[in-house]
């Protein structure tokens, strides 16, 4: 089974802090994704990566950056956390073929105080 | 741009009964993939079923089946013999063939299963 592991289930940070969310997958998937999930809004794509050191912006990249130095690891960075970034963050990975599903981690519930 | 609409924010069903969750999408593409994902409370999102647009036959996975109406751009999920473990948020998602990344999700339907 594919395993996508997010480093924290719950995280509380303060406004202005630099926040790192880590994600690791164990299936040698080319694609990795970061989503934000908010009630009534569904999942919105923040960034994705299709190869090491390659990244593309999703629908809501403002206030976020990402890093993919190794194929199995994809990090989401909140450069200066703000209260409107309080949300559930989901990491996913997939093979490059478009008929392949994305596999999700358990999510990180991030609160910015 | 593609959009996915789930018109039912919440649904409920009695245990052992059948329920259908609706999903419509808007696209100008002819070849694409559709997915239903399930997210139980505080648990991981998992794939329930997928449909390839070029296949006319509706996909089936055990108690889960879809009614895919390509002309109407409709992709509903039917859950038969509902079980308590089916209670979850269900998301419909779309991906264009050849697009290696972008899944467009609906806003979700929260399904409650009553004993």
Image: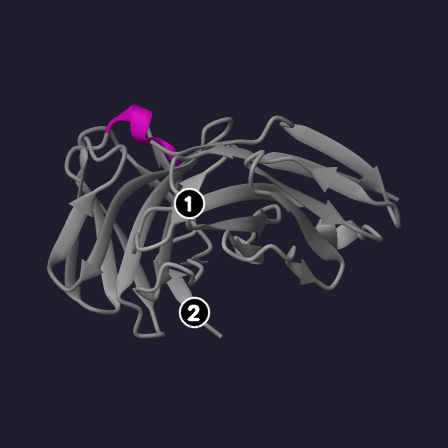
Picture quarter with the N terminus of chain B: top left
Identify the secondary structure beneath mark 2: loop
Looking at the picture, tell me which residue is in the foreground, B57 or B45. B57
Q: Which residue is mark 1?
A: B30
Residue at figure coordinates x 34%, y 66% from the top left: A95
Residue B101 at what x, y percent from top left? 30, 52
Please say if A40 is above or below B57: above
Indicate yes or no whether the magenta region holds residue A83.
yes
Of A4 and B27, the residue lying toward us: B27
- Badge 2 crowding class, 10 Å Cα cut-off, few under 14, some 14 to 19, many 20 or more, is some
Range of the magenta residues? A82-87
Q: Position of residue A98 (x, y in %)?
A: 36, 59
Instruction: Tell if the residue under mark 2 belongs to the same chain as the one under mark 1.
Output: no
Residue B92: give x, y in percent of width and height. Answer: 54, 42
Task: Residue at 38% x, 34% y: name it.
Answer: B2
Q: Position of residue B50 (x, y in %)?
A: 55, 56
According to the picture, the residue beneath numbered tag 2 turns out to be A3
Mark 1 neighbour density, 10 Å: few (under 14) some (14–19) many (20 or more): few
Marks 1 and 2: in contact by CB < 8 Å? Answer: no
Which quarter of the figure is the C terminus of chain B placed in? top right
Q: Residue at x 39, y 63 (%)?
A: A5
Q: Chain of mark 2?
A: A
Asked whether, in this view, residue B88 is left or right of residue A17, the answer is right
């Amino acid at each position: 089974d594919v395993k996508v592991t997010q480093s924290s289930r719950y995280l509380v940070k303060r406004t202005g802090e630099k926040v790192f969310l880590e994600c690791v997958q164990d299936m040698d998937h080319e694609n990795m994704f970061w989503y934000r999930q908010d009630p009534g809004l569904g999942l919105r794509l923040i960034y994705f990566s299709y190869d090491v050191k390659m990244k593309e912006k999703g629908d809501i990249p403002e206030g976020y950056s990402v890093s993919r130095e190794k194929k199995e690891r994809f990090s989401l960075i909140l450069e200066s956390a703000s209260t409107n970034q309080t949300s559930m963050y989901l990491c996913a990975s997939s093979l490059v073929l478009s008929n392949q599903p994305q596999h999700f981690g358990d999510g990180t519930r991030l609160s910015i105080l | 741009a593609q959009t996915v609409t789930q018109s039912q924010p919440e649904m409920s069903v009695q245990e052992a009964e059948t329920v259908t969750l609706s999903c419509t999408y808007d696209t100008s593409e002819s070849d694409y993939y559709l997915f239903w994902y399930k997210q139980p409370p505080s648990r991981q999102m998992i794939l329930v079923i997928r449909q390839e647009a070029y296949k006319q036959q509706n996909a089936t996975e055990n108690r889960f089946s879809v009614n895919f109406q390509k002309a109407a751009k409709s992709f509903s999920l039917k859950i038969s013999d509902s079980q308590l473990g089916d209670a979850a948020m269900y998301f419909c998602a779309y991906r264009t063939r050849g697009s290696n990344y972008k899944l467009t999700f609906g806003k979700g339907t929260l399904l409650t299963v009553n004993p």
